[in-house]
Image (cartoon, grey):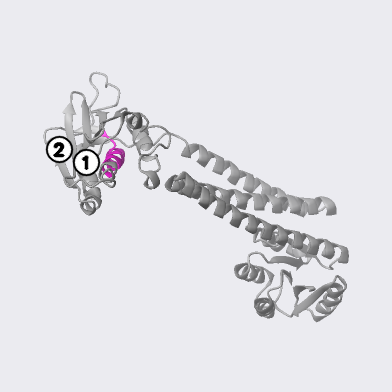
Amino acid sequence: MSETVLFADDEAGIRTVMAIVLADAGVVPLLAADGREALELFSRHRPGIVITDIRMPGLDGIGLLKAVKALDPDAEVIVTTGHGDMELAIESLRLGAADFLTKPIDDALLGFSLARARERRDLKQRLAAYTDHLERLVEEKTRRLVLAERMAAVGQTVAEMSHAVKNMAGGLEASMYVMEKGLEANNREYLLQAWEMIRRDVTRLKDLAMNLLDYAKPVSLHPRRVDPNEPAREALRLVGAAAAAAGVTLTPELDPDIGRAVLDPEAVHACLLNFLQNAVEAFADGDRPDRRVVLATRAAGDAVVYEVRDNGPGLAKEVRDQLFSGFFTTKGNRGTGVGLMSARKLAEEMGGVVEADSSPGAGARFSLRLPRDPRPERPAGTEAPPA
């Protein structure tokens, strides 16, 4: 079957000529006198390629380009423009146009643009098929590796980063194309437009790299003088519903005389939440009627200690020794091995330590020990932080 190409232009003479040119090129032309008619024809026939004048009454070429891409992102759009519409032509490339042609349209350049549009469309289709295959493969491998949560987090980060990089790459590709046009035509206006586009996208790329470096930096803490029992109470409150659903009794043993300490309550809360969730989930495999989890706090010299104890099944020594290893988990399909790694990293950032003690049949104990005030000693005569 012959390929169908939609051509939109408000000048009847140009439509007549283009109908002949397109027919000679071996395609079936669909002709529209304005953007509205073109959009109606596209909705009915869904041609793979659209050629549109950039300036038309009512719905112009830019509007038609946006509407076509909204209906079918894989459709390719070529815009035709006069020499005075270069800014709009460049904007059309940023919006996803495959090419732009200046009037009067050269038959050879038209053939080249059609071939390029077909190549772009075919590449998108192959990429979509490959992506679909890859997604199914990733899903299968993810199930086998039982790292669903970790892969989802990594996948989300990669997807967001890939989307940003793809947009920048598309902008740079458009810049290169405009620059090539400028070099071919020795057109200073084209070259200046391309340089501005390149400068803008390189700046965005540099900003993205800096954001990635910031992402890899240590956790930003915000220590302040607080009651160490407050993050413990909040963690108990959040885990309460899950514990009740699992038939686990949560018992607080919070030292009322622990005093105040300089720490980041949000970071402490994150660690305790991880410990408590692990303790509750430890009862998932087994039929133990008396299920108890205790969260205790106490002062220990210049440190404060948080301790989560349970009377669950406990852990063998070889398992206990791997708890803080990379992505090790005892939860099978329910675990990722990330939680305890994160808790230890947070503890180290706060100047503290995380310890675990457990044996089969004797439950488990996880403790978080933090300095009461991790800041350097103040010189004599300086003012202490407010209580």
Q: Residues within 10 Å of mark 2 (few under 14, many from 20)?
A: some
Q: Is residue 43 above or below residue 266?
A: below
* Residue 83 in sight here: no
Residue 134, image x and y in percent?
59, 52
* Mark 2 residue type: Leu
Residue 254: mark in rendering: 2
Relative depth, front residue between 180 and 195: 180
Q: Are marks 2 and 1 in contact (CB under 8 Å)?
A: yes
Q: Is residue 124 above or below residue 60?
A: above
Residue 21 is left or right of residue 68, and the answer is right
Specify start and end residues of the magenta stretch as a single range: 263-277
Query: How many numbered marks appear?
Result: 2
Residue 232: mark in rendering: 1
For residue 309, what is the image quadrant?
Answer: top left
Residue 119 is left or right of residue 337, and the answer is right
> Which image quarter holds the N terminus?
bottom right
Relative depth, front residue between 122 and 112: 122
Relative depth, front residue between 316 and 203: 316
Residue 16, image x and y in percent?
84, 79
Please report the residue visible at 71 percent of the width from the left and 62 percent of the height from the top: 121
Residue 154 is left or right of residue 302, and the answer is right
Q: Is residue 17 above or below residue 104?
A: below
Predominant SS along the magenta part:
helix
Relative depth, front residue between 43 and 222: 43
* Residue 12 in sight here: yes
